[in-house]
Image (cartoon, coloured by chain):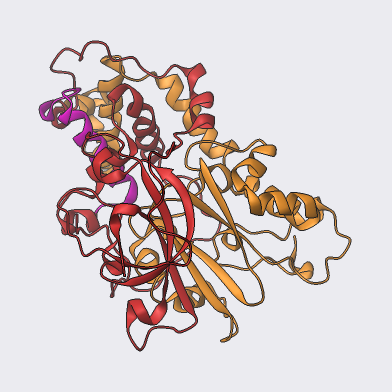
Amino acid sequence: MDGAHDMGGAKGFGPVVPEPNEPVFHADWERRAFALTVAMARPGGWNIDMSRFARENRPPEDYLSKSYFELWLAGLETLMIERGLVTREEVEAGKVLSPPKPGVKPIAPNEVTPAIRRGGPTEREAKAPAMFAIGDTVRMKNIHPVTHTRLPQYVRGHLGTIELNRGCHVFPDTNSLGQGEDPQWLYTVRFDGPELWGKDGDPTLSVSVDAWESYLERA
Amino acid sequence: MSDHDHDHHGHHHHHDHSELSETELRVRALESILTEKGYVDPAALDLLIDLYEKKIGPRNGVRVVAKAWSDPAYHERLMKDATAAIAELDYSGRQGEHMVVVENTPEQHNMVVCTLCSCYPHPVLGLPPVWYKSAPYRSRAVSDPRGVLKDFGVTLPDTTKIRVWDSTAEIRYLVLPMRPAGTEGWSAEQLAELVTRDSMIGTGLPKQPGEAA
């Protein structure tokens, strides 16, 4: 979706402000919100693309006024409410008002390290040959789905060069909707600064995105 | 939330309310709900937090870079298959399943961003800093990287090309900075002192030999 999360090239946000000796978390609730989100993914039965969409799918003023872990918390609440794990009333009241959803098994302490060490690889076996070769010029499709996509607005419609083929990967646009992994070839596509930002674009700049095959058309 | 307040030493109610933010209370209550419903085990949450605060952090990436600087065969393996080479040092998993290392040269400087959210190579760098997830960085890294570098106090020669990698998929990028001059014959341990987190994101440069702590 064309939401506030899609920030590449936006203006007016001011300078980047690095924080010397930054702690991993800035408050205890950030620790717990982070851990709850990571620990609920498997019992909750959602994937990474669903959780990204749950965080970004909100009005721009809401997205931009929440801190990072506030967005995580809001996303977690949405995912759980959607699946009937908790009700909106329970979240607002801060207490249990209905029985638990049956068959939900928590992550046990001894499963934590192995699960993190394993992660969730997204590369899958290819079912068809790649349509594009390294060095091909491609145009990024001008698409505006209302659902989750990983094609940023600032590259849509622009010409780029296929620089690398990263293998076949789970396609977020369908995976976020629970419509299956639909693995597609993933390419690193490189753009020149002036192609993206016009004649005043930095000529020494090139930018790349990692783009699934269905985001691309032959130029 | 009102129940939670009641549990919390009665007459200091209003005082507590100002100390504990609404978000703090909301997260505590949510954890209680999920624990009571049997969806989470608080001991598992403690372990997760401990992992990300103590084990998974930029110190890991520092080891990777220092080894690449001091061991040519490792450098070659790292550039060919970063995921496998990083796993040799026992770093792997969540948000680092598909690693790629991009190497700075006198001709090209690399910088990594995630304009859409906060994708970052956790096994080697830990959780991202606030600025990496912030709107200023996500908006400007792809359009004005030299301006961003200036915010970090870094100026590159005008002739150096800048390559920005927007992490829009599950490929995670680690920048291999240039080994500082004057470090000939240094051990991996000595070199590690020069590697900063920001130099592995591309918003900073390694320390120079005199600067190491």
**What quarter of the picture does the C terminus of chain A occupy?**
bottom left
Tell me, by letter, which chain the rendering colours red: A
Q: Which residue is rendered at x = 33% and y = 80% of the image?
A: A197
Q: Is residue A99 above or below residue B160?
A: above
Front residue of B9/A20: it is: A20
Residue B82 in the image: state x and y as whole percent: 61, 48
Residue B14 figure quarter? top left
Residue A104 in the image: state x and y as whole percent: 28, 15
A121 displayed left or right of A97: right
Q: Which residue is rendered at x = 52% and y = 54% of the image?
A: B173
Q: What is chain B's hue in the picture? A: orange
Q: Is residue A192 above or below residue A187?
A: below
Q: Which residue is rendered at x = 75% and y = 60% of the image?
A: B213
Q: Is residue B80 above or below residue A120?
A: below
Q: Would residue A80 be counted in the magenta stretch?
A: yes
Q: Which residue is rendered at x = 54% and y = 31% of the image?
A: A117
Q: Which residues are magenta?
A: A66-89
Magenta part mainly helix, strand or loop? helix
Residue A84 figure quarter? top left
Residue A148 in the image: state x and y as whole percent: 23, 48
